[in-house]
Amino acid sequence: SANTQGYLLGKDLKNATSFNEKTLILSSQFGAHFGVFTNYYSDRIIVYKDTSIDELNTILNKEDISYVVYIYERETPVIVKNHLDNNFIKIRSNGYEIYKIN
């Protein structure tokens, strides 16, 4: 169904994260379409944003982000995913990668 992607990511985030940890999802487009489901099923603090590597590093330095999610076939450049791969531990999932930041 239409909400499946949001449901699956929400359930994965609920299982992988703690209640007070904040997650950055690198797709405002995903948030606009599926955020209501991801937010509900994860019951977590989630921010949706499109970023370059520089913007991502600024956010990670300024905000208390515990996890970052890269979603395949969305607007975030692959170079951002490569940066995440090279610097953070990832939890592979279905159509996205969840990275542990701190």
Image (tube, grey):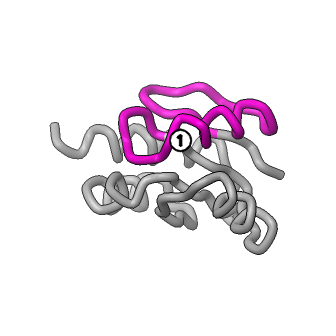
Q: Residues within 10 Å of mark 1 (few under 14, many from 20)?
A: many
Instruction: Look at 55% across and 58% down and name the residue there.
Output: 51
**Residue 18: where, in percent of width, then height?**
70, 55
- Residue 55's quadrant in the figure? bottom right
Instruction: Look at 17% across and 43% down and name the residue there.
Output: 2
Q: Is residue 95 above or below residue 10?
A: above
**Residue 75: where, in percent of width, then height?**
39, 47
Image quadrant holding the N terminus, namely top left
**Residue 41: where, in percent of width, then height?**
42, 53
Instruction: Look at 45% across and 42% down and name the residue there.
Output: 9
**Residue 25: where, in percent of width, then height?**
52, 54
Q: Is residue 97 magenta?
A: yes
Q: Is residue 53 magenta?
A: no
In this rendered view, identify the residue nearer to me: 25 or 41: 25
- Residue 81's quadrant in the figure? top right
Magenta range is 71-98
Residue marked by disc 1: 70
Instruction: Look at 66% across and 58% down and name the residue there.
Output: 56
Q: Which amino acid does the dot numbered 1 rest on? A: Tyr
In this rendered view, identify the residue nearer to me: 20 or 26: 26
Q: Is residue 45 above or below residue 15?
A: below
Horizontal side, residue 75 vs residue 15: left or right: left
Q: How many marks?
A: 1
Q: Is residue 19 above or below residue 41?
A: below
In this rendered view, identify the residue nearer to me: 89 or 4: 89
Looking at the rendered structure, the secondary structure element under dot 1 is strand
Give the residue at the far left of this rendering: 1
